[in-house]
Image: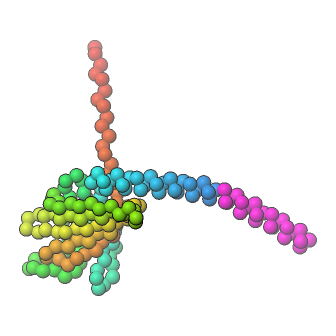
Amino acid sequence: MKKLLLIVLAVVCLAQFTASGKTNSSDRNKRYEKKVARQEKVKEAVESKSYVIELDRLYMSRYGNINLSSGRNYIIIKGNSAAISAGYMGRQRGLIPVAGIRLNGKPSVYKLHKNEAKGNYRVEMEVTEGSDTFHITMTISENGNCSAIISGAKIDNTRYSGNLVPIEKKKTVPEPDYIKL
């Protein structure tokens, strides 16, 4: 009786294992296809300079890290313009306290380097607004994960991490033909 019970249990386990193996391979194919599609979107966005980096973490040199609200902390690159909104916590120089980095401008320097071996991008740019110049260095992986360093004359180097979100191109809808009466 015990042998029969063990044999039935072994058959059920084997059937379950082989059934789950078949679904896992199709799940793996779907995940792989999604990963490749994501990598293509990231590549297209970075090379066309049309993306948003949603910053989700601020790293402080001595005190650890702070989770950021991604809707309020971002770096936007759209053609020849850049916008940065990022929280700041660290040492500062000057009389006016710095609680955040907020600027809109055109990058005076924009360099894009692709590392074929690692499959990532390195973006370096300088953005000037008024008398403030910020140097931004970003490393973007092929999956869209990003590490950014922002430095300026009045603040220390500050490191952030986040994710790349491509800016979708607006699809133009053709005007309908007018109706003749």
Q: Which of the colour schemes (rainbow, by chain, secondary structure, one colour) is used?
A: rainbow
Determine the residue positioned at 20% across, 73% down: 151
- Does residue 87 appear in the picture of this structure? no
Which residue sits furthest bottom?
Answer: 62
Q: What is the quadrant of residue 8 in the picture?
A: bottom right
Which residue sits furthest front?
Answer: 117
- Does residue 4 appear in the picture of this structure? yes
Q: Position of residue 129 (x, y in %)?
A: 11, 63
- Region of the chain picked out in magenta, as a range: 1-22
Image quadrant holding the C terminus, namely top left
Which residue sits furthest top?
Answer: 181
Q: Position of residue 153 (x, y in %)?
A: 13, 75
Q: What is the quadrant of residue 110 in the picture?
A: bottom left
| Residue 131 appears left or right of 48 | left
Determine the residue positioned at 29% across, 66% down: 138
Q: Is residue 6 magenta?
A: yes
Q: Is residue 108 magenta?
A: no
Q: Nearer the viewer, residue 66 or 109?
A: 109
Q: Main secondary structure of the magenta part?
A: helix
Residue 29 vs 2, above or below: the answer is above
| Residue 130 appears left or right of 9 | left
Q: Position of residue 35 (x, y in %)?
A: 47, 57
Image quadrant holding the N terminus, namely bottom right
Q: What is the quadrant of residue 125 in the picture?
A: bottom left
Q: How many marks?
A: 0
